[in-house]
Image (tube, helix red, strand yellow):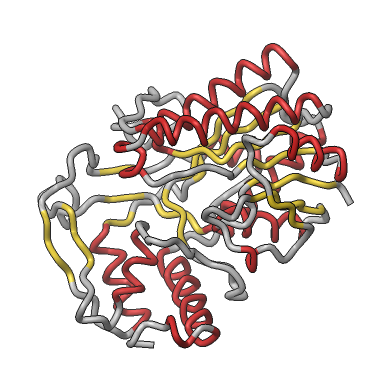
Amino acid sequence: MTTVLVTGGAGYIGAHTAKALRSAGYTPVVYDNLLKGHREAVRWGPFEKGDIADAARLDAVFEAYRPAAVVHFAAVSDVAHSVVDPLYFYRLNVAGSLTLAGRALAHGVKAFVLSSTCSVYGQPERLPIDETTPRNPVNTYGRSKLMVETMLADAAAAHGLNAIALRYFNAAGASFEAEIGEDHDPETHLVPSILQAAGRPDRAIGINGTDYPTPDGSCVRDFVHVVDLANAHVSAITRLLSGRLTGFNALNLGSGRGSSVLDILAHAERITGLPIRREYKPRRPGDPPFLVADPSAAARLLDWRAVHSDPDVLISTAWRWMQTKAIAEPAEAPAAL
């Protein structure tokens, strides 16, 4: 079985991708410092604890497992944190990625998939967002990811690296078997935050702006199921290793459809059967009204489509995983469960 090194593979999207790689016949070796990841989410291959900035530890892992490819998730992603502590983000996301890419090339590994983000576009000039949309990130997190993309593109030109940057839109959902799901502390993403507030009068979901030029006045975002994202990584690895994609490529991963914040709330109330308290707030500076992907390049180059990204599927799988987790850990279960 072909081995793939999955950095950050104990995290949300990384764990789902490790599972998808195993199902596709690869051996995923998870490399994670467990700063944000969860050891119990590593179920589909070997685990090696380590940091992407530790060149000696990376060398040992590359020598032990001889991976054919790297899928790179390891990063910090809290946008608010990136604004107040930018050097921390550059050190982990940029310098760490530089070390990882350098050690991969030193060990002859030239297939590299980067977990990137639609944040590289900032406030888009047009919709839907395709890969020719100007990249103008408005926060340190987005800038750090764009720096890594640029580094990989330069390494592709100079050193023969074959790399794909997958620019996610809003990841959500959980595995259909409810084995793994979104488990951040603190939780900042919309879907799990909404579900954590279901039936909880002591919790409210902040609606940041109700006067946007959208059908219901709230922001519209492109939500994509984590299983769809995981499948895109498998497709990317397969194409890199077969030589069907070479050089550097950047691809959007989204459903191509938009759902508003209030739409997602309505779906969640219907699926859970529980009320969710709302707290209406002013707009947040820098929040665009619409962020929706044009995923046609990924469809063409990866033969990929977001087939599981209907809001009902996103929310129902996330809810099922939360209920399963609450039963397994009753002391931490929300009161409504």
Direction from residue 62 to residue 50 in the image, left or right? left
Q: Position of residue 57 (x, y in %)?
A: 74, 40
| Residue at image point 12% right, 61% down | 280
Above or below, 277 against 184 in this view is below
Where in the figure is residue 20, as x and y percent of width and height?
A: 70, 58
- Between 47 and 123, which is closer to the camera in this rendering? 47
Report how many numbered discs are placed on residues in the image: 0
Q: Quadrant of residue 144?
A: top left
Quadrant including the C terminus: bottom left
Q: Quadrant of residue 54?
A: top right
Taking the image as shown, residue 162 lies to the left or right of residue 211, namely right
Along the line of sight, which residue is nearer the eye, 231 or 105?
105
Name the residue located 64 percent from the left edge and 53 percent from the top edge: 9
Q: Is residue 199 left or right of residue 54?
A: left
Q: Residue at x 42, y 38 (%)?
A: 118
Q: Residue at x 26, y 81 (%)?
A: 200
Left or right: where 98 falls relative to 267: right
Q: x%, y% of residue 190?
A: 34, 60
Q: Nearer the viewer, residue 306 or 241?
A: 241
Q: Quadrant of residue 270?
A: bottom left
Q: Position of residue 287 (x, y in %)?
A: 23, 42
